Image (tube, coloured by chain):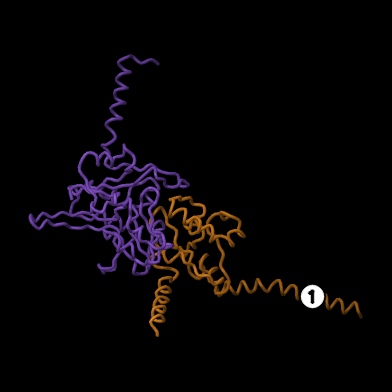
Chain colours: A purple, B orange
Amino acid sequence: MSLSRREFIGIGGGAIAGITLAPGLRLVELARARSPEEAATQMQRWGLLIDIGRCQDCDVCVTACRTENGWYGHNRPATDPQWIRKVTLKDNQTGYVESLPVLCQHCEEPPCVDVCPTGASFKRADGIVLVDKHICIGCRYCMMACPYKARSFVHEDTINQKSYAPRGKGTVESCTLCVHRVDAGKIPACVEACTKDGNQAMVFGDLKDPNSGINKHLAAGPSTPLRPDLNLNTGVRYRGV
Amino acid sequence: MQKIRLMVFGALAVAAAGWLAAAPVLAAETASAKSAIGPVIKTYKGDKCVEPTEEMRRNHMKKILHQRDETMHKGIRTRKYSLKNCIDCHADPKTNSVLGENGFCESCHEYAAVSIDCFTCHSSSPEKNGQPPKAASTDPAGLMEKTISSAVMGTTNGNQP
């Protein structure tokens, strides 16, 4: 089989166009699946970009998180668990109201890890901040240390736990960035729900991969961590706060 | 005369041996009928465990503990020694649980008087196709009641001067 010069150039041009156009246009950068016996490494750092301009007055992310991870309240807002919550901000001068989801910000320098007396609060190699409930004694220092109020304490006996998201009375819990899904090469439940819902306010991806969708989005416009003054280098960043 | 004595003794010995041999079976039968004494060891899926039975009886806790830290801290999610794998094979299809009177984990742990800490946080039911187990909502083992009552007792005891 022989190609004419014109055909060859046509195919090559098409291929180059495919390479240059495809990355960056993807809203959700799919995580590369590790094999189950492979440990998480520092080669990756998982992050989230939340575009408040696209965030609607809905709570699909919260509902998706509850369904995925099997947490629920008892109509006691002061003590009910909340892995992710919608916060409403109002500019008192202009009356402008905006709403944004707040969850564990997966800091590079997490205060919750600094204060934990048992080592239960820890940061995984790929930047996901977790609670090892096997060694959590329920002291709640981490809850006080967290500037984002991202953690909650389980006050009640738990039922209907998911096999991948165990929860128990007397321990602290928070967003795991859907670590079981990330390990399987999927994206967190909140991001999936937001994308499906058409809002597309959340982008998940690897902050260490220069070609990842999230890095393209971060490079394309302004974004800020919450409480930038604390210099925690959060894995979750916001646009339009 | 001595021959007769010997024969009688022999017959008695055989009878005693027979009774001794039958006794555990009888005991086991009555135990299973009452299902209160002795562990109920049943496997509902697969032919054999991930390790020989003797090894698992002695060291299952070590294997689960090791796997737990690997999964939690490193994200290694191999199935072989995972608690999920235990539950998937050993859960009673009737109760959909490893707990309960005849449950694989609970019956043996109760017999050995060793408390299981796993299921205050972990689900005791296998998950099918990523869907939450149905029987878990009904709490077949009555674990909730137990933990609540023990917790209540604990606090009242604690409050007593």
Q: Amino acid at mark 1?
A: Ala
Looking at the image, residue A162 sits to the left or right of residue B1; the answer is left
Image mark 1: chain: B
Circle 1: element type: helix
Q: A151 above or below A51?
A: below
Between A217 and B43, the one lying in front of the other is: A217
Residue B107's spot in the image, x, y percent? 53, 69
Number of marks: 1
Between B156 and B56, the one lying in front of the other is: B156
Residue A170's spot in the image, x, y percent? 38, 68
Locate the C terminus of chain B by quadrant: bottom left
Q: Quadrant of residue B9?
A: bottom right
Locate the N terminus of chain B by quadrant: bottom right
Between B8 and A190, the one lying in front of the other is: A190
Residue A196's spot in the image, x, y percent? 26, 47
Location of mark 1 (residue): B13
Residue A110 shows in this picture:
yes
Residue B148's spot in the image, x, y percent? 39, 74
The residue located at (48%, 59%) in the rendering is B87
Q: Residues within 10 Å of mark 1 (few under 14, many from 20)?
A: few
Between B92 and A167, the one lying in front of the other is: A167
Q: A124 above or below A9?
A: below
Looking at the image, residue B110 sits to the left or right of residue A194; the answer is right
Q: Residue furthest left?
A: A94
Q: Quadrant of residue A64?
A: bottom left
Q: Residue furthest bottom?
A: B161
The residue located at (25%, 55%) in the rendering is A102
Residue A197 shows in this picture:
no
Q: Quadrant of residue A159?
A: bottom left
